[in-house]
Image: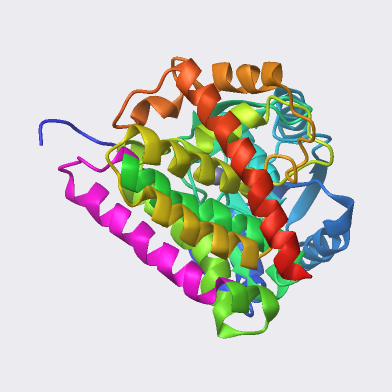
């Protein structure tokens, strides 16, 4: 090996379990006594207020702040100023992926410790040293690599179980993408750590296939724990071990491109990534020598359908999408710095547009089949 890699592999400490918060709230004062407490959605406000109340009893002063949109420049600047003005010595981010990303990014900019408390298992954002930046209306702009993973991650089962099951299904799709993308982008890597990360992603995929449905049916099952932690923790670890060489290939670039369009209603990150994986497999089947891509796609469709994830661009909230819009998304997907260039085979704009159009034609058949089966 003739290169040097600097990697942020995992949070300094992870507390997970039924009573993770009970233990975590006693450790937080050792990290921060005056923390900015970041959240967003009204639906989780009550949970956040309980956490803040507990922190008060543990002698931690909290300065509450909320995102107005996604993790966007406007929100980041606004919260950064609140944290600075109040001389916060730490930041606690409690919410879904966008809140966790924004919290990590602001703590990174202020060089203060960051504590993440995921309120769902919808992404591995509570773990990673990365933040995705969006526009105020949710269009993906760029990734930012941070100085490190969070100082503390608290994954409390009783808190995460309260999240809507749709967030877990979305998390499953996002975690599945690790295998489909890393196995493609890192297929020729000589690096042992990357090879091992790809194999971890395969094991995680199998576990999600085996346990995913039961996890969604029964949040009190052991399967739920394995799946929720697979999505929120293991997926992050895979990204940490694999590092910059073991990244996205097509599913995430397709997600990034599709977010440039107007969704109604809004889709979750993993729901868009799920369509991204299907489009990736469609393209692999045509442009790479992967003869198993079609089989992998059929297997995945069956599973996604079982856990009620959207199988079509239409059901994702992009009804009546035009050819001009597909072209706009494809131009974004093919930008110079896009991870699509990690693909082991080239694809040009015309081919990409045709692949997405082909996917759109086939997906209406898939949706029709699903509706017919559910009757
Ligand atoms: Zn993702």
- Above or below, 46 against 67 in this view is below
The quarter of the image holding the C terminus is bottom right
> In the figure, 39 relative to 335: above or below?
below
| Residue 169 percent across, percent down from the top left | 65, 61
The single residue placed furthest to the bottom in the displayed view is 221
Question: Quarter containing ligand 1?
Answer: top right
Q: Residue visible at 43% across and 28% down?
A: 340
Can you see residue 59? no
Residue 158, quarter of the rendered image = bottom right
Which region of the structure is painted magenta? 185-212
Q: Does the magenta stretch include residue 365?
A: no
Residue sitting at 63 percent across and 68 percent down? 306
Residue 175 appears in the picture as rendered? yes
> Which image quadrant is residue 6 in?
top left
Magenta-span inclusion, residue 197: yes
Q: Main secondary structure of the magenta part?
A: helix
- On screen, residue 249 above or below 73: below
Q: x, y (%) of residue 80? A: 71, 30
Residue 350, image x, y percentages: 49, 17
């Amino acid at each position: 090996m003739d290169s040097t890699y600097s990697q942020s592999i995992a949070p300094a400490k992870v507390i997970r379990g039924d009573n993770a918060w009970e233990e975590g709230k006693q450790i937080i004062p050792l990290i921060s006594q005056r923390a900015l407490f970041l959240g967003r959605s009204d639906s989780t406000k009550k949970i956040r207020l309980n956490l803040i109340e507990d922190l008060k009893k543990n002698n931690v002063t909290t300065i509450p702040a909320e995102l107005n949109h996604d993790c966007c420049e406007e929100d980041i600047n606004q919260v950064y100023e609140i944290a600075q003005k109040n001389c916060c010595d730490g930041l606690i981010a409690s919410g879904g992926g966008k809140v966790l990303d924004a919290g990590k990014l602001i703590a990174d900019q202020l060089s203060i410790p960051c504590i993440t408390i995921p309120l769902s298992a919808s992404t591995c954002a509570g773990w990673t040293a990365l933040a995705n930046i969006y526009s105020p209306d949710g269009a993906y702009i760029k990734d930012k690599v941070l100085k490190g993973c969070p100082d503390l991650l608290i994954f409390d089962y009783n808190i995460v179980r309260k999240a809507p099951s749709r967030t877990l299904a979305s998390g499953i799709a996002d975690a599945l993408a690790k295998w489909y993308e890393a196995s493609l982008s890192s297929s020729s890597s000589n690096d042992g750590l990357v090879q091992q990360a790809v194999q971890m992603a395969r094991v995680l995929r199998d576990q999600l296939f085996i346990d995913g449905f039961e996890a969604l049916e029964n949040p009190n099952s052991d399967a739920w724990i394995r799946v929720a932690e697979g999505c929120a923790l293991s997926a992050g670890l895979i990204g940490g071990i694999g590092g910059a060489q073991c990244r996205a290939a097509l599913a995430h670039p397709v997600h990034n491109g599709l977010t440039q369009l107007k969704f109604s209603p809004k889709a979750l990150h993993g729901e868009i990534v799920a369509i991204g994986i299907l489009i990736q497999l469609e393209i692999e089947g045509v442009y790479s020598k992967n003869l198993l891509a079609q089989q992998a796609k059929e297997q995945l469709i069956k599973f996604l359908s079982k856990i009620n994830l959207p199988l079509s661009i239409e059901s994702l909230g992009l009804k009546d999408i035009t050819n001009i819009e597909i072209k706009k998304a494809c131009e974004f997907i093919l930008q110079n710095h896009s991870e699509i260039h990690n693909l082991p085979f080239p694809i040009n704009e015309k081919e990409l547009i045709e692949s997405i159009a082909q996917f759109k034609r086939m997906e209406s058949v898939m949706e029709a089949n699903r509706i017919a089966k559910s009757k």
